Amino acid sequence: MVIASGLSFDTSTFLSITVLDDNLFSAKALVTPTKTPEKLENLDVKRIELPDLTSEYLFHFSSPSFHTLTIKNSKKTVIYRGFSTISIKSDAFKSFDLNENISVEVTSEESSTPFSHDTFTNPVVIFSKIMTLTPGYKEEKNENITVTEENGKLVIHGLIPAGKQVKNEIMITLPNGNVEQYVFDAANIDTDGFLKRDKVFEKIIPLEKIGLYLVELNYESGFAAYNGPVVYGNFLPVLPNNYDNIQKDISNSDVSIVATESLKFVNNIRSISGKSTLTLDNNLSNLAIIKANDMAIHNNLSHTDSYGDKISDTAKRNNIKLIGNIGENIA
């Protein structure tokens, strides 16, 4: 039963009711908004990491209007509301059947008063698609680099300032979990082999399959200048990703235990992606310890050791024999 201003009516549906002071209400003039809500082709979804190791997904809207996000399948419906931002916990859809497509709809309601959000116009649908749920990943952006999907192509462009050393390599994780490497065109590469500074660069890569792609550009130090997701197709990236449910804390002074726990972590991630397990190699382990000790002693996190050698030359200097090519990740 709802009672307002002496009137009552029965309802079985939740209603949002705003009670206004009589004097304030008499001063308000209801107006017809002249602005028509803009239709959306895609949803702007960003992932943020929380201190408790969980995450949220934020839906951003350019308009400060009142938005309602409705996501449903044949058995369940969830509804979220907000103005320019709507927040959803990453585990909100764990009960959904991931093999079933979902319906995603966003409506927009304008304020029907000239200076308040007390009452709203009828909702207008600004987005409506059948989509597939997929895991989401956080965007790490340390340089002026933008990565987008445009007409089935991955478009990477940006501007690197003077003094920065960004590799000319692009690492892309495909929807099937495989990783491919691309390089920028010669016109974008400086004489020292890094991306040109103070000059706009662009790289266009055709995408063969729909799904979620992870794109990474790194500094010479190995840290990410840019690392972020790109969605090609009607996918909604709001599920927990492969790292959310994996134990991340590895803390022990015993090197062998740290190595074993690190290997376990890597193999857990690989198993989720359907990859085979890895084993430790004694030569590589010894080389890693030598390199780690060198960085610790000289307080220098770098692919170049205190002798000025890269990892392959570090191995030769220490009589460690390796077969094939070798690379390292120090981040």
Image: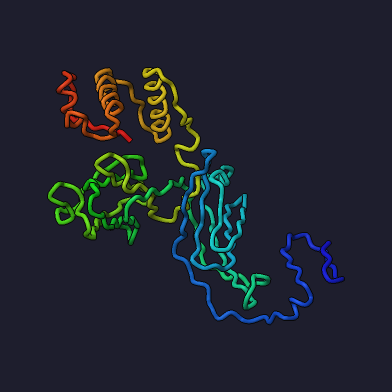
Residue 206 location in percent, x, y?
27, 55
Q: Residue at x 26, y 57 (%)?
A: 159
Which quarter of the rendering shows the N terminus? bottom right
In the foreground, 175 or 195? 195
- From the viewer's perspective, is residue 214 above or below residue 253? below
Residue 229 location in percent, x, y?
38, 49
Q: Residue at x 52, y 43 (%)?
A: 50
Q: Which quadrant of the structure image shows residue 22?
A: bottom right
Q: Residue furthest front?
A: 298
Q: Residue at x 29, y 56 (%)?
A: 156
Q: Residue furthest right?
A: 6
Residue 129 location in percent, x, y?
49, 60
Q: Is residue 312 left or right of residue 64?
A: left
Q: Is residue 220 left or right of residue 212?
A: left
Q: Is residue 164 left or right of residue 2?
A: left
Q: Is residue 231 left or right of residue 111?
A: left
Q: How many marks?
A: 0
In the foreground, 228 or 173? 228
What colour scheme was applied to this rendering of the protein? rainbow
Residue 40 location in percent, x, y?
47, 66
- From the viewer's perspective, is residue 180 above or below residue 45? above
Q: Which quadrant of the structure image shows residue 94?
A: top right
Which quarter of the rendering shows the C terminus? top left
